[in-house]
Image (tube, rainbow, N blue to C red):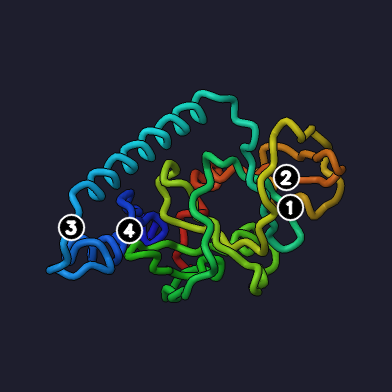
Amino acid sequence: MADFPSRFRSSSSPPAWDGARDATRNGPRGLSAQSPVNPLASAHRRERLREFQTGLSEKLRKAQNAPLAVNRLGIQIGTQRLLVDLADAGEILPVPDIAPVPLTKAWYRGLANVRGNLLGIVDLSLFAGGPATPLDKESRVLAFSSELRFSVGILVSRMLGLRSAADLTTAPARDAGDALFAPWVRASLVDAQQVQWQELDLSTITTDERFVDIARA
């Protein structure tokens, strides 16, 4: 059971948009098959599209070469405030419909269909031996980055926004509750407002043998 169903591979292809398919079949939306097409207007649109693509490529190139100032994502699981490296974080989703998988452990909540790809949903608090993560309108699923090669997401009580590593300093753990995620925490940190965080290492979680052993004994 080590490879099923925790390690479904997610497709790297972007979802097809219905509007794009309609445009391919029927031409630009709002024009019938018989509508005349102004060649000058079409050329102008193509030129604007090329300019947009060129500008976007340049912005991406500059962003890749510039120092990364904001590189942590703040999340909350239960009462725990956690930081995740953006390189390890994938998509943030509203909690989808989850289909339970028989004979799996309680922390493995089941499978969700995300645009045709199967995503395993894990309650990380339960996995760590804590209470179940309560779900409400602020709850989300944080999918792991495709770089981690795990098609899985964890339940998150709420998103707390982006944080810059430059604004964080190392601090000692302050209470026993910080021990819940201790095996996968890189460091305890405190921000400029003296709020304490734990830096959660998602890549370490994926190498934990217990994380892939979802079968109920």
Residue at image location 23% in from the left, 67% down from the top: 31
Q: Please identify, in this view, whether the residue under mark 3 or under mark 1 is nearer the observer.
A: 3
Q: Are marks 2 and 3 in contact (CB under 8 Å)?
A: no
- Residue 3 occupies quadrant: bottom left
Q: Is residue 172 above or below residue 76?
A: above
Q: Is residue 196 visible?
A: yes
In the picture, the quarter occupied by the N terminus is bottom left
**Residue drawn at the location 40% of the way across and 46% of the way down:** 149
Q: Is residue 159 left or right of residue 40?
A: right
Q: Earlier in the sequence, mark 4 or mark 2?
A: 4
Which mark is nearer the camera, 2 or 3? 3
- Contact between marks 4 and 2 (CB within 8 A): the answer is no
Callout 3: few (<14), some (14-19), or many (20+) C-alpha neighbours within 10 Å?
few
- Type of amino acid at the residue the image marks with label 4: Pro
Badge 2 is on which residue? 198
Foreground mark, 1 or 4, reads: 4
Q: Is mark 2 in CB contact (under 8 Å) with mark 1?
A: yes
Residue type indicated by callout 2:
Gln
Task: Tell me, yes or no, whether the two marked residues, 1 and 4, touch with CB atoms within 8 Å.
Answer: no
The residue tagged 4 is: 15
Nearer mark to the viewer, of 4 and 2: 4
In this rendering, position of residue 177 left or right of residue 33: right
The residue under label 3 is 37
Q: Is residue 183 visible?
A: no
Which residue matches tag 1?
A: 81
